[in-house]
Amino acid sequence: MQDSQSAFKKEDPLGMDAMSSEEYASQSKLLQEFTNVPSIESAWLFKTNNEDRSRAMFSISQPDLLANKKRKYILHSHIVTHGTMPLECHWSPFPIEMTGVSAVVPSPSGSKLLVVRNGEKGSRTTLQIVNQSHVEKEIHVDQSIHGPLYTDEWFHGISWNHEETFIAYIAEQTPRPKPAFDDAGYRKGGSSEEDCNSWRGQGDWEEDWGETYSRKGRPSLFVLDIASGEVRAARGVPKSISAGQVVWAPPSSSGHQKLLVFVGWLEHNGFQSTARKLGIKYCSNRPCSLYAIHSPFEEEPNADNASDSGSESVPASVATNLTPSISSALFPRFSKDGKLLVFLSSKCAVDSGAHNATDSLHRINWPSDWKADEQLSVTDVVPVVMCPQDGCFPGLYCSAMLSDPWLSDHCTMVLTSAWRSTEVMLSIDVLSGEVTRISPQDSDYSWSTLAISGNNVLSVSSSPIDPPQIRYGRRASTEDHDGRCAWVWDEVTSPLTAASNKVKALLSHHKLSILRIPVPDPSDELSDGGRLQFEAIFVSCEDSSQKPTVLILHGGPHSASVSSYSKSSAFLASLGFNLLIVNYRGTLGYGEEALQSLPGKVGSQDVQDCLAALDHVIEEGLVDASRVAVVGISHGGFLTTHLIGQAPERFAVAAARNPVCNLSLMIGTTDIPDWCYAVACGTEARRLASESPSLDHLRIFHQKSPIAHISKVKAPLLMLLGGADLRVPMSNGLQYARALRERGGEVKTIMFPEDTHEIDIPRSDFESFLNMGVWFKKYLKQI
């Protein structure tokens, strides 16, 4: 008798035939090779008693597909220098996995480590103080005090004081109590604890900060006293302010004053006339200021006793705005001698409405005994660059800043910034304003700063297909050709970044180049910066003209594709594709005028720039014009779906990740409705913006959207959507996919229910790029 199990034929997964199943098996094995390569999340560098020896600590991560989360590790190294001799690097034999750890932050001396474990599903948060031999202190913080600590790149701020006795940090404020009910109805003044005879309602809806901050809307300032284990909330911060990026001010000359400086964002932060929290992820255009406040552990003596004794009283704790004259102030950093407070500003983004723009750097001369009623003047250090000369500094574009960015002279800081299509390291003298590029001038690779100790800089360099290589930089005794102090960059041998032999072989014949693309049909109405050439990063195969090409488009639109390592780009290149990565006008890194040339012209200027870049490589004989794919995320998806509609004969296949397909639909569902007005209406956005768009506004949104061109689409489209996306909700992509199918178009849709805009949960990330590789191979082979 036939086995009952074999009587039923096993079906292939939905949407997969036998041929694609074989391709899935082959590509998934290859993609796993890329997934296994760990990433360096952050690093710290510490001095030792031996001036030739430094101690480094690395925080690294690696996707865990089985557990569907990221593994986190700590790895230690000793770096030994011998004058001009090669570096010696001594690594710990194995990394230490940090299970359940949300953040690790070393103390200033490097002798202690704060380990944060945020509680899940309402459980308490654990803070551990670890010394060189054991756990010195463990503090459990109940939900009644605060919720999880913010460990993201925006609100995050965990700061040890200089004496290493207190730690300031940002955490979610305890939620307001929900209404309680029992058999008798509403329990007025009822207990906060639920019991079997009562239940809780929802209460008033509270706004949050949008994409990736779902149910996180009240970031607040807290301080831990390490000795007692007590946690106190900062007093005197208005409820309308969300706090972040806290640092300790240097001690006053009397030694008594303990001040904290933090960034505060107001609820009124966009074009709208009423207060509302708008999405803040990737949006530096939210107004913010630096505030100073006394530590909640600073004693406030009784006023009567203070006046009787004649002693100096500590003022009541009230947050004081330090930067009322400027619309944006971020990343406060005190110089090592405590005399300067330096901060970054995104005032161009705030004032124009562009979600990102060119940054500026400013300083405040910090008094040794600052009083709350003392006004401080803000001095410009690095102004906004409007139209850079060819090859010259294009302005600051910094998405983050090291907690300790200072060299040993107390007045020079090192920042990582976009410079056209590369990421570079800059030294900035905050007294003179002199900006110097310290990463190699002749490199098309991107360089990023990891940590600084004295005049030693730990960094990484990489290309789209070359994993990050750790570098150790030192000031040389010689000068470069411009008369500036030269830097020597030594390669640090590392167990972290080695790709497999298979991956190395597949990518060994690829080449990296950065192409200058002339502006198509420059108009006299454009600014000088808007007429400057833009760029495209070209990763070419051997015999590139005979290989298919993938056009890759970044989101934003005011972001950038820099020439740093990308697992997804390297994977696509390993499949035998050329990569054309376009930094169309509006991209960061080219000066403010070029960036501001795009708002109001989306769907036309950026589309023409992408086609001009493609025309350039075709005319140069670098690619096969008949075998071109296009892919993008967010605004890159907006461009992808525009291109296959406006230029249907140019693209054989396409993929879009959480694309903006219909602005008239997005305006009522996104966490950033002001973005829709900014990109579609340009300089008129602030005047026109409304929570209830008029019919004329909706018509403009539709005209500038890809869905207006859907009847002309011919290319098969892979649609990848995140079900928890608050930025471009999945309804945008679903509407476009359904409309395309209605017209007989070929479309495949994959939904990742728990993913936000980035689609970066490990399994989702893996599956999305696996499907992309298979999809492209299928349709580019047929030509």
Image (spheres, helix red, strand yellow):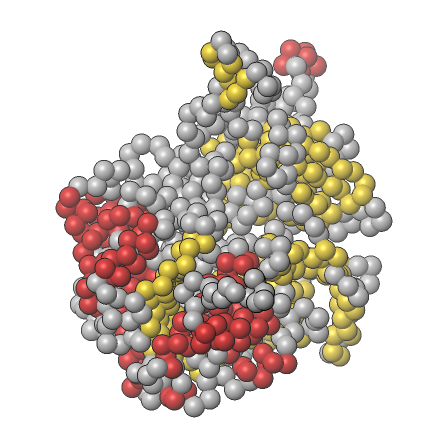
Between 500 and 170, the one nearer to me in the picture: 500
Res. 662 in view: yes
| Residue at (53% x, 40% y) in the render | 244
Query: How many numbered markers are drawn?
Result: 0
The furthest residue to the front: 1
Residue 198 lies, in percent from the top left, at: 54, 17
Taking the spot 19% from the left edge, 59% from the top edge, the residue there is 708
Q: Nearer the viewer, residue 760 or 352?
A: 760
In percent of width and height, residue 438 lies at 56, 69
Q: Quadrant of residue 385?
A: bottom left
Q: Give the quarter of the figure containing the C terminus.
A: bottom left
Looking at the image, the residue that sits furthest to the top is: 184
Q: Is residue 487 visible?
A: no
In the rendered image, the vertical position of residue 490 relative to residue 124, given as above or below: below
- Return the x and y of residue 623 as percentages of the image width and height: 36, 85
Of the pair 678 and 417, the residue shown nearer to us = 678
Residue 42, relative to residue 502: is it above or below?
above
Kindly identify the residue that appears in the image at 55 percent across and 13 percent down.
190
Q: Residue furthest toward the right?
A: 133
Q: Where in the figure is residue 322, as x and y percent of width and height?
A: 49, 37
Residue depicted at x 29% and y 42%: 668
- Horizontal side of 647 relative to 282 (left or right) equals left
Left or right of 613, for residue 97:
right
Q: Quadrant of residue 620?
A: bottom left
- Residue sitting nearer the eye, 346 or 731: 731
Placement of the N terminus among the 4 image quadrants:
bottom right
